[in-house]
């Protein structure tokens, strides 16, 4: 019986997992081959926390939920006063001095092929201790990627 079990397991393995294996899911950019760049459309003045509340229009920035832009690293972002112990998820956006959201593109370059993604927010999930990029792809589809900020370069225009 164990011989037939192993043949069955081998058959299932070949049927389900035949072909090229990709150890990294498409939504996890932390170990993906290539180079990612956060390209800011303007100089950020503030890092702001947003809520997923239905009471407030998404995209509306509350000045009391903002801190001066601390720099673009996980340590500097997590070191701000925006992070309290009572939440598990923070939705972060970057704004200019007039509290308008700055357009940010993530450009992923892999083997000479570029993939562009428009960032709507940077999400931090405390339980996973991980950042996520939320936004839309070039074809307008919603995307949510797991990212490691250390593996991305940053392009911020000169003032």
Image (cartoon, rainbow, N blue to C red):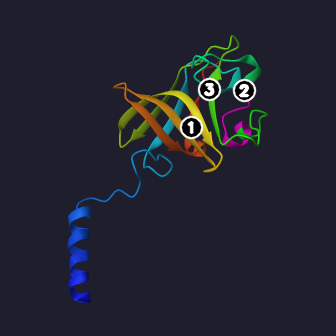
Residue extending furthest toward the top: 98
Residue at label 2?
69
**Cα gap from disc 2 to disc 1, whole angstroms:** 17 Å
Disc 3 vs disc 1: which is toward the camera? 3
Q: Secondary structure at mark 1?
A: strand
Residue at label 3?
93
Give the residue at x 43% y 28%.
Answer: 136
Disc 3 vs disc 2: which is toward the camera? 3
Residues in magenta?
66-77
**The N terminus sits in image quarter:** bottom left
Disc 2 vs disc 1: which is toward the camera? 2
Q: Secondary structure at mark 2?
A: loop
Residue 126 part of the magenta segment: no
Q: Is residue 30 above or below residue 52?
A: below
Mark 3 or mark 2, earlier in chain: 2
Residue 68 part of the magenta segment: yes
Q: Residues within 10 Å of mark 2 (few under 14, many from 20)?
A: some
Residue extending furthest toward the front: 55
Q: Nearer the viewer, residue 35 or 90?
A: 90
Q: Nearer the viewer, residue 67 or 85?
A: 85
Q: Is residue 77 above or below residue 53?
A: below
Residue 151 image position (x, y, % from top left): 56, 45
Q: Residues within 10 Å of mark 1 (few under 14, many from 20)?
A: some
Give the residue at x 66% y 46%.
Answer: 126
């Amino acid at each position: 019986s164990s011989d037939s079990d192993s043949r069955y397991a081998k058959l299932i393995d070949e049927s389900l997992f035949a072909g090229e294996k990709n150890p990294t899911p498409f939504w996890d950019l932390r170990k993906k081959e290539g180079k990612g760049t956060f390209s800011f459309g303007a100089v950020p003045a503030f890092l702001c926390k947003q809520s997923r509340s239905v009471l407030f229009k998404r995209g509306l920035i509350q000045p009391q939920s903002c801190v001066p832009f601390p720099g673009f690293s996980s340590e500097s972002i997590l070191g701000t006063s925006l992070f309290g112990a009572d939440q598990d998820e923070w939705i972060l956006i970057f704004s200019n001095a007039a509290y308008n959201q700055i357009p940010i593109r993530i450009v992923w370059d892999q083997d000479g092929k570029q993939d562009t993604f428009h960032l709507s927010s940077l999400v931090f999930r405390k339980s996973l201790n991980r950042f996520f990029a939320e936004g839309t792809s070039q074809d307008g589809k919603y995307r949510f990627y797991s990212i490691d900020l250390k593996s991305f370069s940053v392009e911020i225009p000169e003032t």
